Image (cartoon, helix red, strand yellow):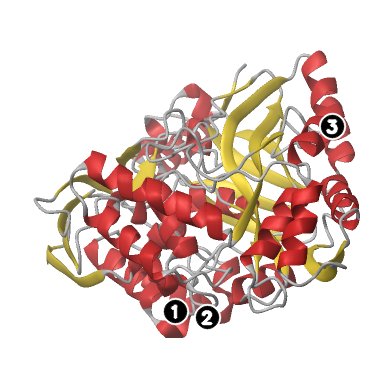
Amino acid sequence: MTGEFRKWLATGLTVLAGLTMATILASPATAQGKTLTVRFYDDPAGFDPANIFRIENENIAFNIFSGLTSYDGVTGEIIPDLATSWETADNKTWTFKLREGVTFHKGYGDFTAADVIYSFNRIKDPATASPYAAELAGIVSMEAPDPYTLVIELDAPNGNFLHTVANYHQGQIVSQKAIEEAGDQVRWQPIGTGPYYLDSIDVSSQIVLKRHEDYYDGPAPIETIVFNIIKDEATATIALRNGEVDLVMRANQEENLATLEAEGFTMNTVQNYAVALMVVNPEVEPLGDKRIRQAIAHAIDFAAITQAISPSLTQAHYSMLMPWMDVYTDDIPKYEYDPERARALMAEAGYPDGFSFKNLSTSAQGVSEVQQFQIDYLSQVGIDMEMELVDTPTFNQRRNAGDFDTATRLLPAVNPDMILFSFLHPDNLVPNGLNGARYDNPEVTELLEAARAEPDPEAAYEMYKRVQQIVAEDLPYIPTYASNVYWPGKPEVTGVHINYLAQVNFHDVDIAE
């Protein structure tokens, strides 16, 4: 045996000894170290599940963290994640069997039931100031008979609890050690158990994720995902056409979509996934009068605006819920375009000569074409909507605090109960929840609580139907349009399944040879 051969053999054995079983068993596609470049469309605002906001940030967190349950990317159905199974006899006591052998990123140890208990208690802790605290307020106790069994007791039956603990916001499981070590930088140092971990971030230009080699479902086909921050839509389109990015997260301009479709790019899409609302602060006069809110709704021709500007991306909508949700009803008051009715309602409310209010929005977006149309329509009945533009972090902070006259909000959710409770129940009033309209109707509250606890689906449906009818009359939130989502990409980028939260599980994504 020559010296060179001994050196070669020793080097090879050392390399083999350092390989994990996951690496040895990895497919050729996994071993090739593929990189996917994705357009990210706004300034990142951090990835702490306790206060994360905005869909682009949630897409990152969805791939970093896991929940007890998750959502199937194609059907939207609840599927196991960190919990392999669960059982309940009364929707009040829930027992979860947890997945063994799951590890946190970057050497933060094995996942156990203690991590779930810590994560949920952290959300509930007033010191955390999480806007999602009310989602977990019904938890009375959490016990772990062993490291991989978790028993959660609720204060009332909740047939929707599997949505509450899903991989979204308050359901995302963190590492106590990682949270404590990160301190006030926790939003920039997320540690989860998901298929990817945060490798690096430059908040002005780029976010880099690396695959978690020890992910419980096996390493993802793509090793590195580079999110390049490209705010301008036209620039993002050019970047895709030039091969500078492989996938565009959220394309929302008709002309760009038409160009890309004509050139053969894949138009990954989910239709009718969420409704956009105007959130109205009733503490600002005269917005506290429902006749004024109804006048605003009647004054704007949302159907004409969406048809003129973005027929592929939006359509007028009159409900807080989407038609594909199982408790949705179309039997509600609808505010179609009627400027004469708007003027009459204003006169009834004591404002025949009109009024003004400020609409809070982001400077990154600027005054959109949709908003320009809304301003014009409102002006025709004597309403002056002034735009108040702030940077995205300030917008999130003020909207969460309820510091606005009106503001916009999109309602992505798979669980209709989550929308209705979050935005209509008084336990969720801002700044402790998402009820930015400060809506507090005792009849609606009673119906929501009864519907959540009702085991008979038909009886629950009748309660949810009545809630929708009352709220459409009170109109604390003005529905504007329903959204479709497009992520155009290269044809060779496969597995881009956008769920009804507008999220993509990048563990499913690959780049064909």
In this rendering, is residue 4 above or below 444? above
Left or right relative to 155: residue 291: right
**Picture quarter containing residue 42?**
bottom right
For mark 1, what is the residue?
180
Residue 188 placed where, x, y %?
Answer: 60, 67
Q: Which quarter of the image is occupied by the N terminus?
A: top left
Name which of mark 1 and mark 3 comes first in the sequence: 1
Residue 391 makes an appearance in the image: no
Q: Secondary structure at mark 3?
A: helix
Name the secondary structure under disc 1. Answer: helix
Tag 2 residue: 183
**Number of other residues with Cα within 10 Å of mark 1, as a class: few under 14, some 14 to 19, many 20 or more:** few
Quadrant position of the C terminus in the picture: top right
Q: CA distance from mark 1 to mark 3?
A: 51 Å
Badge 2 amino acid: Gly
Q: Residue at x 76, y 54 (%)?
A: 342
Q: Which mark is residue 439?
A: none
Query: Mark 3 = which residue?
Result: 308
Q: At which x and y percent is residue 334?
A: 60, 43
Q: CA distance from mark 1 to mark 2?
A: 5 Å
Q: Which kind of residue does numbered mark 1 sit on?
A: Glu
The quadrant in which residue 414 appears is top left
